[in-house]
Image (tube, coloured by chain):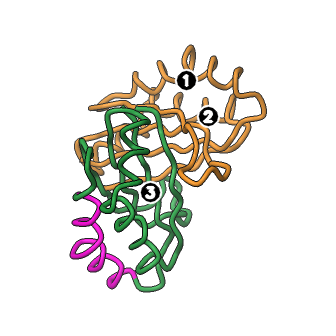
Chain colours: A green, B orange
Amino acid sequence: MVKLVVAYGPPEDATAFDQYYADTHAPLAQAVPGLRNFEAGKVLGTPDGSAAPYHLIAQLSFDDLEALQTALGTPEGQAAAGDIANFASGGATLMVVDA
Amino acid sequence: MVKLVVAYGPPEDATAFDQYYADTHAPLAQAVPGLRNFEAGKVLGTPDGSAAPYHLIAQLSFDDLEALQTALGTPEGQAAAGDIANFASGGATLMVVDA
């Protein structure tokens, strides 16, 4: 398995981000073909109380790297990826992680 | 559930990092009391080919925030946390994430 990890930086308006994410972006992400598991977790803080660099971390699991790359090329994958700019005011860091 | 996410920046010597992590650090992390699940995934890259900010991402799951905080205070938790400085030449970002 491989995961696409999407780490969202702290947004300008956390309430608006959370609402858009739940109502609009998560459904787009969950519609991506070949997706085996979807997780999105709010960052609660850091163990030492310093500011966390991210607000939310999403993880999308696929069978393998080929399945992930295929998924990103589908209309649904393009729609989900293209939607990030609509709400991620704190930026988004995307990584492919072995799992 | 909550997760302690540990994101390791690119180390000076990736081979040495990987060996130390597998042989020494992962066993210390897995010995932490109350740990429900342990995952460590190598970052393979980014979808757009830019440099990834992290080399490896570990995720340690606990029943809840209290269990995580208790775990970090145990001798095993202190040993695992204290060991990070022994090998994480690229730094380590620790976050508590809702799961």
Q: Amino acid at mark 3?
A: Val
Could you classify mark 1 by the number of other residues whose Cα lies within 10 Å: few (under 14), some (14-19), or many (20 or more)?
many
- Same chain letter for marks 1 and 3: no
Q: Is residue A64 above or below residue A37?
A: above
The residue lying at 39 percent from left, 63 percent from top is A78
Which residue is the site of mark 1? B25
Please state the extent of the stretch shown in magenta in the rendering: A14-30
Which residue is the site of mark 3? A6
The reply to whether discs 2 and 1 touch (Cβ–Cβ < 8 Å) is yes
Secondary structure state at the residue bearing disc 2: helix
> Where residue A9 sits in the image (x, y, percent)?
51, 68
Q: In the image shown, does B83 or A63 lie closer to the viewer? A: A63
The residue lying at 48 percent from left, 39 percent from top is A97
What label does residue B12 carry, if any? none
> Where residue A61 sits in the image (x, y, percent)?
32, 42
Indicate which disc, 2 or 1, sits on the residue closer to the N terminus: 1
